[in-house]
Amino acid sequence: MFQIQSSSPVSCTLLAVLCGKVTDKQRTPPGLVPEAKRPRLSYPFPELLSSGRLEVHPLINPTVDQFREAQRAVQPNLMYLQGQQLENEKEIGTLVWGDADVSDPQIFSSLITPPFPTIVYLEIPVGEKLAQSLQSKGIPYVIYWRNSFSSYAASHFHQALMSVVQSSCSHTWDAFQLAHASFRLYCARNNDLQSVKLGPRLLGDAPKINIFPPENEMAVEEGSSEHFPAIKIYDEDVNMKVLICGVPCTLDACLLGSLEDGLNALLNIEIRGCKLQNRVSAAPPPLHVETLSRGVVTMRCDITTCSSSHVPLLVSGSAQICFDDQV
Protein backbone atom coordinates (compact mmCIF):
# COMPACT_ATOMS: atom_id res chain seq x y z
CA MET A 1 0.00 0.00 0.00
CA PHE A 2 1.47 3.34 -1.03
CA GLN A 3 1.25 6.06 1.59
CA ILE A 4 2.60 9.57 1.40
CA GLN A 5 5.33 9.10 3.95
CA SER A 6 9.06 8.71 4.43
CA SER A 7 11.51 7.32 6.96
CA SER A 8 12.27 10.77 8.38
CA PRO A 9 10.32 12.39 11.26
CA VAL A 10 8.54 14.46 8.60
CA SER A 11 6.06 12.19 6.85
CA CYS A 12 6.09 13.77 3.39
CA THR A 13 8.83 15.58 1.51
CA LEU A 14 7.56 17.81 -1.29
CA LEU A 15 9.62 19.11 -4.19
CA ALA A 16 7.61 21.99 -5.66
CA VAL A 17 8.83 23.02 -9.11
CA LEU A 18 7.33 26.33 -10.22
CA CYS A 19 7.74 28.08 -13.55
CA GLY A 20 6.73 31.45 -12.13
CA LYS A 21 5.01 34.22 -14.04
CA VAL A 22 6.01 34.75 -17.65
CA THR A 23 6.79 38.42 -17.06
CA ASP A 24 8.94 37.60 -14.01
CA LYS A 25 11.15 34.96 -15.61
CA GLN A 26 14.26 37.06 -16.02
CA ARG A 27 14.27 38.30 -12.44
CA THR A 28 13.12 35.09 -10.74
CA PRO A 29 16.15 33.50 -9.03
CA PRO A 30 16.67 29.89 -10.17
CA GLY A 31 17.31 26.95 -7.92
CA LEU A 32 16.21 26.08 -4.41
CA VAL A 33 14.98 29.36 -2.92
CA PRO A 34 14.85 30.25 0.80
CA GLU A 35 11.37 31.10 2.03
CA ALA A 36 12.23 34.76 2.70
CA LYS A 37 13.35 35.25 -0.91
CA ARG A 38 10.45 33.55 -2.68
CA PRO A 39 8.57 35.87 -5.05
CA ARG A 40 5.06 36.85 -3.98
CA LEU A 41 2.52 36.40 -6.76
CA SER A 42 -0.36 38.82 -7.06
CA TYR A 43 -2.84 35.97 -7.58
CA PRO A 44 -3.52 34.40 -4.17
CA PHE A 45 -2.16 30.90 -4.71
CA PRO A 46 -1.63 29.34 -1.27
CA GLU A 47 1.96 29.66 -0.14
CA LEU A 48 3.94 26.44 -0.05
CA LEU A 49 5.27 26.31 3.49
CA SER A 50 6.56 23.44 5.58
CA SER A 51 3.83 22.59 8.06
CA GLY A 52 2.52 19.55 9.90
CA ARG A 53 3.63 16.41 8.09
CA LEU A 54 4.79 18.33 5.01
CA GLU A 55 8.36 19.47 4.36
CA VAL A 56 8.50 21.80 1.35
CA HIS A 57 11.48 22.32 -0.96
CA PRO A 58 10.64 24.97 -3.60
CA LEU A 59 12.46 25.08 -6.91
CA ILE A 60 11.64 28.11 -9.05
CA ASN A 61 12.33 28.36 -12.78
CA PRO A 62 15.23 25.86 -12.67
CA THR A 63 17.54 24.67 -15.37
CA VAL A 64 17.38 20.98 -16.29
CA ASP A 65 20.59 20.31 -14.35
CA GLN A 66 19.24 22.10 -11.27
CA PHE A 67 16.08 20.01 -11.44
CA ARG A 68 18.07 16.78 -11.58
CA GLU A 69 20.29 17.88 -8.71
CA ALA A 70 17.26 18.81 -6.60
CA GLN A 71 15.77 15.35 -7.16
CA ARG A 72 18.95 13.69 -5.95
CA ALA A 73 19.26 15.97 -2.93
CA VAL A 74 15.63 15.99 -1.80
CA GLN A 75 14.40 12.52 -2.91
CA PRO A 76 10.77 13.67 -2.61
CA ASN A 77 7.75 11.53 -1.83
CA LEU A 78 5.55 14.07 -3.60
CA MET A 79 6.55 16.12 -6.64
CA TYR A 80 4.42 19.12 -7.62
CA LEU A 81 4.95 20.74 -11.01
CA GLN A 82 3.14 23.98 -11.81
CA GLY A 83 3.06 25.41 -15.32
CA GLN A 84 3.64 29.01 -16.27
CA GLN A 85 1.40 31.59 -14.68
CA LEU A 86 0.25 33.55 -17.68
CA GLU A 87 0.18 37.32 -17.61
CA ASN A 88 -3.58 37.57 -17.16
CA GLU A 89 -3.28 35.10 -14.25
CA LYS A 90 -6.54 33.44 -15.23
CA GLU A 91 -4.96 30.26 -16.56
CA ILE A 92 -1.94 28.04 -16.03
CA GLY A 93 0.34 27.34 -18.99
CA THR A 94 2.77 24.59 -19.93
CA LEU A 95 6.08 23.61 -18.31
CA VAL A 96 8.73 26.07 -19.46
CA TRP A 97 11.92 26.57 -17.44
CA GLY A 98 13.86 29.56 -18.69
CA ASP A 99 13.99 29.06 -22.46
CA ALA A 100 13.49 25.28 -22.24
CA ASP A 101 10.06 23.80 -22.94
CA VAL A 102 10.02 20.51 -21.01
CA SER A 103 6.33 19.70 -21.45
CA ASP A 104 6.95 16.99 -24.07
CA PRO A 105 6.21 13.61 -22.40
CA GLN A 106 9.38 11.92 -23.62
CA ILE A 107 11.61 14.83 -22.67
CA PHE A 108 10.15 15.30 -19.21
CA SER A 109 9.90 11.62 -18.26
CA SER A 110 13.60 11.28 -19.07
CA LEU A 111 14.33 13.88 -16.38
CA ILE A 112 12.71 11.82 -13.59
CA THR A 113 15.26 9.51 -12.00
CA PRO A 114 15.09 6.89 -9.21
CA PRO A 115 14.18 6.80 -6.42
CA PHE A 116 10.81 7.79 -7.86
CA PRO A 117 8.30 9.83 -5.86
CA THR A 118 5.12 8.09 -4.78
CA ILE A 119 3.01 10.76 -6.43
CA VAL A 120 3.49 13.46 -9.05
CA TYR A 121 0.98 16.29 -9.36
CA LEU A 122 0.99 17.95 -12.79
CA GLU A 123 -0.67 21.36 -12.59
CA ILE A 124 -0.54 21.92 -16.32
CA PRO A 125 -3.25 21.87 -19.01
CA VAL A 126 -3.84 18.78 -21.17
CA GLY A 127 -1.51 16.65 -19.07
CA GLU A 128 -2.89 13.16 -19.76
CA LYS A 129 -0.11 11.99 -22.10
CA LEU A 130 2.58 13.27 -19.76
CA ALA A 131 0.84 11.55 -16.84
CA GLN A 132 0.69 8.25 -18.73
CA SER A 133 4.36 8.56 -19.62
CA LEU A 134 5.31 9.05 -15.96
CA GLN A 135 3.17 6.15 -14.79
CA SER A 136 4.67 3.83 -17.41
CA LYS A 137 8.07 4.70 -15.99
CA GLY A 138 7.06 3.30 -12.60
CA ILE A 139 5.57 6.22 -10.66
CA PRO A 140 2.59 4.75 -8.74
CA TYR A 141 0.28 7.78 -8.77
CA VAL A 142 0.00 10.79 -11.07
CA ILE A 143 -2.54 13.60 -10.73
CA TYR A 144 -3.21 15.58 -13.89
CA TRP A 145 -5.71 17.86 -15.64
CA ARG A 146 -7.12 16.65 -18.96
CA ASN A 147 -8.04 20.12 -20.24
CA SER A 148 -7.29 23.78 -19.72
CA PHE A 149 -8.36 25.15 -16.34
CA SER A 150 -8.53 28.42 -14.46
CA SER A 151 -6.09 29.54 -11.81
CA TYR A 152 -9.01 29.74 -9.39
CA ALA A 153 -9.88 26.06 -9.85
CA ALA A 154 -6.23 25.03 -9.64
CA SER A 155 -5.70 27.07 -6.49
CA HIS A 156 -8.62 25.47 -4.68
CA PHE A 157 -7.69 21.88 -5.53
CA HIS A 158 -4.03 22.59 -4.76
CA GLN A 159 -4.90 23.95 -1.32
CA ALA A 160 -7.24 21.05 -0.55
CA LEU A 161 -4.65 18.44 -1.53
CA MET A 162 -1.83 20.05 0.45
CA SER A 163 -4.09 20.43 3.48
CA VAL A 164 -4.81 16.69 3.49
CA VAL A 165 -1.12 15.81 3.14
CA GLN A 166 -0.13 18.25 5.90
CA SER A 167 -2.67 16.98 8.40
CA SER A 168 -2.73 13.19 8.01
CA CYS A 169 -0.58 10.23 7.02
CA SER A 170 -3.04 9.29 4.30
CA HIS A 171 -2.98 6.90 1.40
CA THR A 172 -2.54 8.71 -1.91
CA TRP A 173 -5.90 7.45 -3.16
CA ASP A 174 -7.77 8.77 -0.11
CA ALA A 175 -5.93 12.11 -0.17
CA PHE A 176 -6.96 12.66 -3.78
CA GLN A 177 -10.57 11.62 -3.19
CA LEU A 178 -10.92 14.02 -0.26
CA ALA A 179 -9.28 16.91 -2.14
CA HIS A 180 -11.40 16.19 -5.22
CA ALA A 181 -14.59 16.19 -3.15
CA SER A 182 -13.60 19.60 -1.77
CA PHE A 183 -12.94 20.79 -5.33
CA ARG A 184 -16.40 19.60 -6.43
CA LEU A 185 -18.03 21.44 -3.52
CA TYR A 186 -16.15 24.59 -4.54
CA CYS A 187 -17.38 24.26 -8.13
CA ALA A 188 -20.96 23.61 -7.01
CA ARG A 189 -20.99 26.67 -4.76
CA ASN A 190 -19.77 28.78 -7.68
CA ASN A 191 -22.20 27.23 -10.21
CA ASP A 192 -19.25 25.93 -12.21
CA LEU A 193 -20.34 22.36 -12.83
CA GLN A 194 -18.40 22.23 -16.10
CA SER A 195 -15.13 22.38 -14.14
CA VAL A 196 -16.15 19.23 -12.26
CA LYS A 197 -16.18 17.27 -15.53
CA LEU A 198 -12.88 18.80 -16.63
CA GLY A 199 -11.27 18.66 -13.19
CA PRO A 200 -8.18 16.80 -11.98
CA ARG A 201 -7.84 13.05 -12.50
CA LEU A 202 -5.79 10.38 -10.76
CA LEU A 203 -3.79 7.67 -12.50
CA GLY A 204 -3.13 4.75 -10.16
CA ASP A 205 -4.77 1.79 -8.48
CA ALA A 206 -7.10 1.95 -5.52
CA PRO A 207 -5.66 0.32 -2.37
CA LYS A 208 -6.41 -3.38 -2.19
CA ILE A 209 -8.19 -4.82 0.82
CA ASN A 210 -7.49 -8.49 1.48
CA ILE A 211 -10.69 -10.46 2.03
CA PHE A 212 -10.61 -14.05 3.18
CA PRO A 213 -12.34 -16.53 0.85
CA PRO A 214 -15.71 -17.74 2.15
CA GLU A 215 -14.33 -21.17 3.03
CA ASN A 216 -11.72 -19.57 5.29
CA GLU A 217 -14.13 -17.21 6.97
CA MET A 218 -15.76 -19.98 8.97
CA ALA A 219 -14.07 -21.61 11.91
CA VAL A 220 -15.33 -25.15 12.37
CA GLU A 221 -15.19 -26.58 15.87
CA GLU A 222 -13.71 -30.07 15.94
CA GLY A 223 -16.43 -32.70 16.15
CA SER A 224 -19.17 -30.14 15.58
CA SER A 225 -21.20 -29.09 12.57
CA GLU A 226 -21.65 -25.55 13.92
CA HIS A 227 -20.00 -22.68 12.12
CA PHE A 228 -18.90 -19.35 13.50
CA PRO A 229 -17.29 -16.43 11.62
CA ALA A 230 -13.51 -16.27 12.00
CA ILE A 231 -14.01 -12.97 13.81
CA LYS A 232 -17.21 -11.16 14.68
CA ILE A 233 -17.48 -7.48 15.59
CA TYR A 234 -20.48 -6.53 17.70
CA ASP A 235 -21.19 -3.13 16.22
CA GLU A 236 -24.58 -2.49 17.82
CA ASP A 237 -23.04 -0.19 20.42
CA VAL A 238 -20.41 1.45 18.20
CA ASN A 239 -21.28 5.09 17.59
CA MET A 240 -19.23 7.65 15.69
CA LYS A 241 -20.47 11.22 15.67
CA VAL A 242 -19.47 13.60 12.89
CA LEU A 243 -20.09 17.35 13.07
CA ILE A 244 -20.44 18.96 9.63
CA CYS A 245 -20.29 22.76 9.45
CA GLY A 246 -21.04 24.96 6.47
CA VAL A 247 -22.92 27.97 5.22
CA PRO A 248 -26.70 27.62 4.80
CA CYS A 249 -27.56 26.43 1.30
CA THR A 250 -29.88 24.20 -0.70
CA LEU A 251 -28.63 20.63 -0.64
CA ASP A 252 -28.90 19.28 -4.17
CA ALA A 253 -27.60 15.99 -5.59
CA CYS A 254 -24.24 17.49 -6.56
CA LEU A 255 -23.55 18.88 -3.10
CA LEU A 256 -24.72 15.74 -1.33
CA GLY A 257 -22.68 13.50 -3.65
CA SER A 258 -19.53 15.54 -3.05
CA LEU A 259 -20.16 15.53 0.69
CA GLU A 260 -20.69 11.76 0.71
CA ASP A 261 -17.49 11.08 -1.24
CA GLY A 262 -15.53 13.43 0.98
CA LEU A 263 -16.79 11.79 4.17
CA ASN A 264 -16.02 8.32 2.79
CA ALA A 265 -12.46 9.40 1.99
CA LEU A 266 -12.09 11.00 5.42
CA LEU A 267 -13.31 7.84 7.18
CA ASN A 268 -10.96 5.72 5.06
CA ILE A 269 -8.05 7.91 6.15
CA GLU A 270 -9.09 7.53 9.78
CA ILE A 271 -9.48 3.74 9.62
CA ARG A 272 -6.38 2.99 7.53
CA GLY A 273 -4.31 4.80 10.15
CA CYS A 274 -5.89 3.13 13.18
CA LYS A 275 -3.80 1.36 15.83
CA LEU A 276 -4.66 -1.20 18.48
CA GLN A 277 -3.99 0.33 21.90
CA ASN A 278 -5.32 -2.30 24.28
CA ARG A 279 -7.32 -5.53 24.46
CA VAL A 280 -8.77 -7.40 27.40
CA SER A 281 -11.02 -10.41 27.86
CA ALA A 282 -14.70 -9.55 28.13
CA ALA A 283 -18.07 -11.22 28.46
CA PRO A 284 -20.03 -11.65 25.22
CA PRO A 285 -23.31 -9.77 24.79
CA PRO A 286 -26.12 -11.69 26.57
CA LEU A 287 -28.11 -12.18 23.37
CA HIS A 288 -25.12 -13.81 21.65
CA VAL A 289 -23.98 -16.20 24.37
CA GLU A 290 -25.93 -19.15 22.98
CA THR A 291 -24.44 -18.70 19.50
CA LEU A 292 -20.79 -19.02 20.61
CA SER A 293 -18.99 -22.32 20.11
CA ARG A 294 -16.39 -23.80 22.42
CA GLY A 295 -12.95 -22.30 21.91
CA VAL A 296 -14.34 -18.90 20.93
CA VAL A 297 -13.17 -15.99 23.08
CA THR A 298 -14.56 -12.48 23.43
CA MET A 299 -12.36 -9.42 23.83
CA ARG A 300 -12.78 -5.68 24.15
CA CYS A 301 -10.33 -3.87 21.89
CA ASP A 302 -9.47 -0.19 22.12
CA ILE A 303 -8.27 1.39 18.89
CA THR A 304 -7.25 4.92 17.98
CA THR A 305 -7.82 6.32 14.52
CA CYS A 306 -5.49 8.47 12.43
CA SER A 307 -6.61 11.63 14.25
CA SER A 308 -6.34 9.93 17.68
CA SER A 309 -10.07 9.37 18.07
CA HIS A 310 -10.84 6.54 20.50
CA VAL A 311 -13.12 3.68 19.37
CA PRO A 312 -13.88 0.65 21.60
CA LEU A 313 -14.88 -2.60 19.87
CA LEU A 314 -16.24 -5.87 21.24
CA VAL A 315 -15.15 -8.86 19.15
CA SER A 316 -15.38 -12.65 19.28
CA GLY A 317 -13.29 -15.25 17.52
CA SER A 318 -10.75 -17.99 18.00
CA ALA A 319 -7.96 -17.29 20.46
CA GLN A 320 -5.41 -17.49 17.65
CA ILE A 321 -7.15 -14.77 15.67
CA CYS A 322 -8.03 -12.51 18.60
CA PHE A 323 -4.41 -12.45 19.78
CA ASP A 324 -3.02 -11.86 16.29
CA ASP A 325 -1.61 -8.31 16.14
CA GLN A 326 -2.08 -8.22 12.36
CA VAL A 327 -5.86 -8.69 12.44
Image (tube, grey):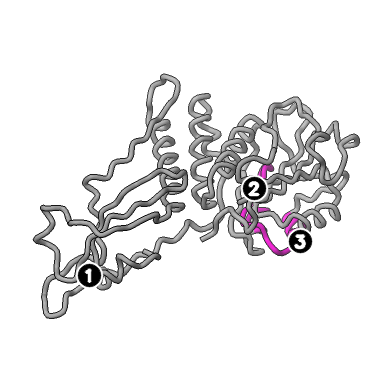
Q: How many marks?
A: 3
Q: Quadrant of residue 93?
A: top right
Q: Amino acid at mark 3?
A: Ser
Nearest to the eye among marks 1 and 3: give it.
1
- Identified at 33% across, 36% down, the residue is 241
Left or right placement of residue 327 versus residue 246 in this view: left
Looking at the figure, which quarter contains the C terminus?
A: bottom left
Between the C-alphas of marks 1 and 2, the distance is 44 Å
Density class for disc 2 (Cα within 10 Å; few <14, some 14-19, many ≥20) is many
Foreground pick, 17 / 238: 238
- Residue 255 lies, in percent from the top left, at 42, 31
* Mark nearer the N terminus (1 vs 2): 2
Residue 201 image point, x, y percent: 56, 46
Residue positioned most to the bottom: 223
Please, which residue is most extreme toward the left here?
290
Task: Name the residue furthest right.
Answer: 26
Mark 1 / mark 3, whichever is N-terminal: 3
- Residue 107 within the magenta-colored segment of the rendering: yes
- Please tell me the numbered disc located at residue 190: none
Foreground mark, 1 or 2, reads 1
CA–CA distance between discs 2 and 3?
17 Å
According to the image, label 3 marks what residue? 110
- Badge 3 crowding class, 10 Å Cα cut-off, few under 14, some 14 to 19, many 20 or more, is few
Residue annotated with mark 2: 121
Magenta range is 105-134
Q: Is residue 81 left or right of residue 199?
A: right
Circle 1 Cα neighbour tier, 10 Å, few/some/many (<14 / 14–19 / ≥20): some
Q: Is residue 178 above or below residue 137?
A: above
Residue at screen point 72% across, 49% down:
15
Q: Are marks 1 and 2 in contact (CB under 8 Å)?
A: no
Q: Where in the figure is residue 89, as x and y percent of width and height? A: 73, 28
